[in-house]
Amino acid sequence: MRIYKCIKIEGGCYFFTVVLAHRRGNHLLIQHIDTLRESFKQIQKAHPFTLDAVVILPDHLHGIWQLPAQDDNFSFRWRLIKSHFSRSITTSEYVSESRQRKNERGIWQRRFWEHVIRDEADYLHHVEYIHYNPVKHGYVKRVRDWPYSSFHRWVARGIYPVTWATDNPNVIDRDFE
């Protein structure tokens, strides 16, 4: 049996990848984007964290969170977000016997991937990865054309030009998955 260890740092900054249980051809997250946004808002209101960067793709999402001081419980927040979303939609997803025994839906992978952001360079590296991800997966040719991304907030704040990564598509050549 595998033992999963995660580094928990009070007030830490983390990069996350959260994935649907059945990825192939699944567009659940963007089909129910308003429900997903509401799930984030509800949990963020009750259990604060700062969502610095995010991209929602049809079958997975990436995000960077900053937790409050004296708080390291990102797992609890993810469980609540996933549960809120799952309870808010109706689907006819396949539910394995194992999940049925635990009274679980078959929407999300049980685990998620997290990475502690080490420094400013690591932070910027992951923000770029998040914002470039829709291009990487072939959903759009330009970052600005994907509507489900914090890229647009970063442009509005003057951090990125709207043409970021358009003129030089080799600007992002890293892969974390």
Image: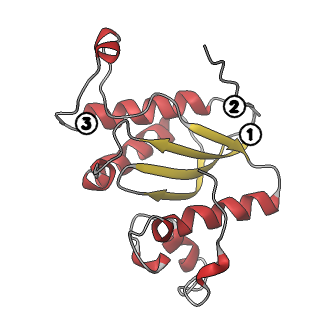
Expressed as whole percent of the image width and height from the top left, the position of residue 71 reads 69, 31
Expressed as whole percent of the image width and height from the top left, the position of residue 14 reads 67, 45
**Three-letter amino acid code at disc 3?**
Ser
Q: Relative to 4, say whether 65 is above or below.
A: below
The residue shown at (45%, 64%) is 137
Question: Where residue 11 is drawn, which disc sits there?
Answer: 1
Q: Relative to 169, say whether 175 is above or below.
A: above
- CB-based contact (under 8 Å), mark 1 and mark 2: yes
Label 2 CA crowd tier, 10 Å (few <14, some 14–19, many 20+): some
List the residue tagged with mark 3: 88
Mark yes or no: residue 158 visible.
no
Question: Where residue 72 is drawn, which disc sits there?
Answer: 2
Asked which quadrant contains residue 165, the reply is bottom right
Q: CA distance from mark 1 to mark 3?
A: 30 Å
**Element carrying mark 3:** helix
Q: Residue furthest top?
A: 101
Asked which quadrant contains residue 98, the reply is top left
The residue shown at (46%, 37%) is 43
**Element carrying mark 2:** loop
